[in-house]
Image: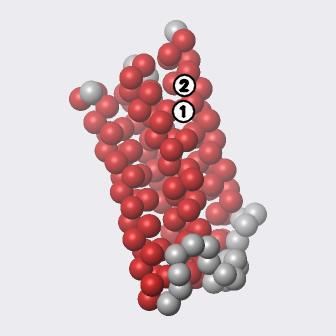
């Protein structure tokens, strides 16, 4: 597993990011006197909504990426290939988070935020194919 140290650290960063965002979302709702659950109004101009959505986006994207990343280590995907995919994905998720939290035009649907989300999904699909290929061959 030593060969996968960079990938393992990247996966742990993604997990930690989800936890930090959960704490940020929950504490932001508490300070605003809101209950847990969906934030209303569901509007990108609403900071509390954006905080909640960036947390939920992080959680929703975590398992589809982490599961194939762990499987990739188990089936012997090249450590460098896996590290590049893990850290590209991690960088995309961090940029997505920063842009979404900042708000403005870049954070609205159909903009840079959406491009980053789709880019992360594409990296995930590539990881799935690379892992599947390694498992078969």
Q: Residue placed farthest to the right in the image? A: 110
**Any part of residue 44 in sight:** yes
In percent of the image, x 65 and y 71: which residue is there? 107
Element marked by disc 1: helix
Depth check: 15 or 95 in front? 15
| Quadrant position of the N terminus in the picture | top left
61 above or below 53? above
Q: Which residue is mark 1?
A: 127
- List x then y, in percent, for residue 117: 63, 55
Answer few, some or many: residues within 10 Å of disc 2's Cα (few below 14, many 20 plus, some between 14 and 19).
some
Counting the numbered discs, the total is: 2
Using the image, tell me which numbered label, if any, was put on residue 130: 2
Q: Is disc 1 in contact with disc 2, using a CB cutoff of under 8 Å?
A: yes
Residue 100 appears in view: no
Q: Residue at x 54, y 32 (%)?
A: 127
- The chosen color scheme is secondary structure
Label 2: which secondary element: helix
Q: Position of residue 34 (x, y in %)?
A: 53, 85
Q: Which mark is residue 105?
A: none
Q: Is residue 3 left or right of residue 77?
A: left
In the foreground, 30 or 3: 30
Residue 56 occupies quadrant: bottom right
The quarter holding residue 24 reads bottom left
| Mark 1 Cα shell of 10 Å, populated few (<14), some (14-19), many (≥20) | many
Q: Position of residue 88 (x, y in %)?
A: 49, 45
Q: Is residue 75 left or right of residue 53?
A: left
Q: Who's the residue at 54% across and 25% down the image?
A: 130
User: Whole-Å distance between the Cαs marked 1 and 2?
Assistant: 5 Å
**In the depicted structure, whether residue 11 falls above or below residue 18:** above
The single residue placed furthest to the left in the displayed view is 2
Q: Residue at x 75, y 63 (%)?
A: 110
Q: Is residue 135 above or below residue 106?
A: above
């Amino acid at each position: 597993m030593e060969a996968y140290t960079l990938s393992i650290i990247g996966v742990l960063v993604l997990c930690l990011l989800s936890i930090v965002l959960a704490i940020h979302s929950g504490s932001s709702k508490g300070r605003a006197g809101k209950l847990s659950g969906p934030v209303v109004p569901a509007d990108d101009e609403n900071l509390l909504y954006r905080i909640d959505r960036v947390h939920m986006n992080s959680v929703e994207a975590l398992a589809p990426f982490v599961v194939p990343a762990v499987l990739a280590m188990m089936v012997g995907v090249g450590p460098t290939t896996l590290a590049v995919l893990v850290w590209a994905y991690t960088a995309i998720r961090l940029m997505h988070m920063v842009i979404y939290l900042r708000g403005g035009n870049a954070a609205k649907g159909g903009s840079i935020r959406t491009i980053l989300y789709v880019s992360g999904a594409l990296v995930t699909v590539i990881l799935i194919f690379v892992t599947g290929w390694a498992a078969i061959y």
